[in-house]
Structures are given as structure tokens and as C-alpha cells.
Amino acid sequence: MPDHPVGSLATVVLTTSYDTEVIVVTGSTSFGATDQLRQLLVEHGARWVVDAVAVRPGHPQLLAQLPDRRWIVGLPGNPYAVLTAAHTLLALLLAGLTERPLPALPRIPLTGDITAAPGRTRLISVTWDGATARPVGGHRPAFPLAAVSLDWQPRTPVPLILLTG
């Protein structure tokens, strides 16, 4: 049964206990007819902080705050995109709310054949030997992730997003 802004999505987002500070939704975050979270947030007066990110995977992520001050984090539906967005958006929100400092991202030279994503930064699964990072190849998800900008040149340092607990 398809969801609607007045259906189960609305029930979870709008009736969650007011002592909840952060609500995380996976899926329903893109811009298609079946993706209802954005419409729901607009209809209920949310304040937008992040409305999609120019990154692949995980671009339809979002961050908004409801009038009652609860945070809504919308993560993509693809499992690997969820994982990357959780580390690049949700983790930052939680660090801010708990006043924890953000970890420094090591910058490591990246080697290998990398295809640019037009108009987007790419998050590439890499292996890291301590001195250089290399793509794992194919579409195999792994950590760490290298944040590869549009103007990246081979062997230039890139930030690594490490899986931390």
C-alpha cells in the first residue's frame, strides 16, 4: 500500500513522543510522486537545513526541524546510500546536539581510475594502506570512503570518512 502524507509516515513523524529530539526516516526522501517526506514537512511548517546534497551515493538526504523543535533526518532508501548519509549527515547532527567535536578527516593521496559524477562529489569505497587509498572497484560497498571532488586529480589527497563507533 503506498504511503501518503496523511498515512503511516505522518503518524510516525507527527505523533512521536515530544521527548524525542531526532526522528530518522529511511526512504521516501527523493523527489518522486511516491516520496512523501518533503511534502509532509512542507505542510507542517518545517524549517529546512539540508534539502539534498550534491553527492553520490546519497543525494536525496535531508535535514529539517519541525516547529516543535524536533529534528527530522531523511536518509535515502538504498542501503549503502543510507550508510553513507548516516555518516555524513546524521552523525554530524548528533555530534552537534551532544556538543562532541567532529573528528578530523585524514587526507590521503588517492590513486586509481575514478569516473567523475557530473555536478557531484563522489563518495568512493576505498582500501587504505596508511599511505594511499585505492578504489575497491565495482559497486562493492566498504569503508573508509574517499570524498572525491569534481576537480580531483590522480594522487592528490582526499578526505577519508572512517567508520567510527
Image (tube, rainbow, N blue to C red):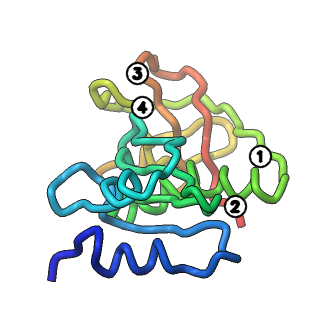
**Relative side of 106 to 90, left or right:** right
- Label 3 to label 1: alpha-carbon separation: 24 Å
Cβ–Cβ under 8 Å for marks 4 and 1: no
Q: Position of residue 80 (x, y in %)?
A: 39, 61
Q: Residue at x 54, y 79 (%)?
A: 16
Upstream in sequence: badge 2 or badge 1: 1
The residue identified by callout 2 is 164
Q: Looking at numbered disc 4 in the image, what kind of residue is underneath it?
A: Thr
Q: Position of residue 59 (x, y in %)?
A: 37, 44
Quarter of image, res 131: top right
**Residue 88 badge:** none
The residue identified by callout 3 is 150
Helix, strand or loop for disc 4: strand
Upstream in sequence: badge 2 or badge 3: 3
Q: Residue at x 42, y 31 (%)?
A: 121
- Label 3 to label 4: alpha-carbon separation: 6 Å
Q: Is residue 155 above or below residue 15?
A: above
Q: Looking at numbered disc 1 in the image, what kind of residue is underneath it?
A: Pro
Cβ–Cβ under 8 Å for marks 3 and 1: no
Q: Residue at x 18, y 63 (%)?
A: 34
Cβ–Cβ under 8 Å for marks 3 and 4: yes
